[in-house]
Amino acid sequence: GAVVSQHPSRVICKSGTSVKIECRSLDFQATTMFWYRQFPKQSLMLMATSNEGSKATYEQGVEKDKFLINHASLTLSTLTVTSAHPEDSSFYICSANTGGETQYFGPGTRLLVL
Amino acid sequence: ILNVEQSPQSLHVQEGDSTNFTCSFPSSNFYALHWYRWETAKSPEALFVMTLNGDEKKKGRISATLNTKEGYSYLYIKGSQPEDSATYLCVLSDLSGNTPLVFGKGTRLSVIA
């Protein structure tokens, strides 16, 4: 099946710094990728839809200036958490599909902001 | 607001036992339901996608059913094995079918050898 990777798998940073998370489709091209986050004991929640060559679409309540998304190629989308704060500590995961209904997920990135 | 409920939140079964868990969702505006298996430190793995009322899907010892009129899906595991230990996610797509919009919290299954 299709493979999606994420990097890093885990990151710890100081409050106020920015953190970039990469999501790559390894064996297929994805014009659209999706970013989610999961707080403890909560469901995965869609944050934004990343569109290759155009602006991302953000879900209600997600600040586009805080969570910068860049989808510069058909195999890479990046999520940058700018000026991270402890409340941004969460599990971030991306997904993409090959044109069908099944989403292929990355393994996720656990972010801890001190 | 679309809400997907999964039950139980967690369960422990003995190796060889069969088990099942439930996903409940609003029956209106249904498009597709997905089941994923999510092992710790790995990517969620797609098991099934179902769209039609009465759909039944099977993959090895795992099967799933869908009732869109009453808004539920069951996932069954026959003869559970330790390698079945994972969190099983139920996910609903919206009308476009392209974005898995709403996730359940998952059912965490532990199979004890």
Image (cartoon, rainbow, N blue to C red):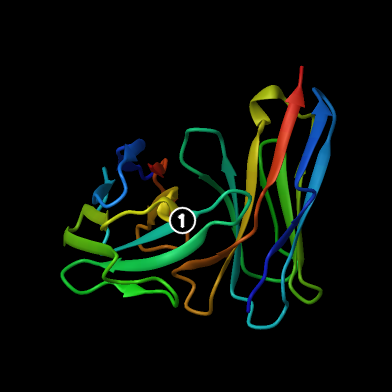
Instruction: State the image coordinates of residue A104 (x, y, percent, origin top left).
Output: 42, 50
Q: Residues within 10 Å of mark 1 (few under 14, many from 20)?
A: many
Which quadrant would residue A42 be assigned to in this image? bottom right
Q: Is residue B81 left or right of residue B33?
A: right
Instruction: State the image coordinates of residue B87 (x, y, percent, origin top left).
Output: 64, 41
Amino acid type shown at disc 1: Arg
Q: Residue at x 73, y 78 (%)?
A: B27
Q: Is residue B62 left or right of residue A7?
A: right
Q: Residue at x 69, y 40 (%)?
A: B108
* Extreme residue in the top direction: B113
Q: Residue at x 76, y 29 (%)?
A: B80
- Quadrant placement of the C terminus of chain B: top right
Give the total number of marks visible in the rendering: 1
Q: Which of the two residues, A68 or B61, is positioned nearer the viewer here?
A: A68
- Chain name for mark 1: A
The vertical placement of B14 against A16, above or below, is above
Q: Is residue B110 left or right of residue A62?
A: right
**Which residue is under mark 1?**
A37
Q: Residue at x 79, y 38 (%)?
A: B11
Q: Which of the two residues, A63 or A25, is positioned nearer the viewer here?
A: A63
Say what secondary structure mark 1 lies in: strand
Instruction: State the image coordinates of residue B9 (x, y, percent, origin top left).
Output: 75, 47
Q: Which of the two residues, B11 or A85, is positioned nearer the viewer here?
A: A85
- Quadrant placement of the N terminus of chain B: bottom right
Instruction: State the image coordinates of residue A59 (x, y, percent, origin top left).
Output: 42, 74
Q: Which of the two residues, A38 or A101, is positioned nearer the viewer here?
A: A38
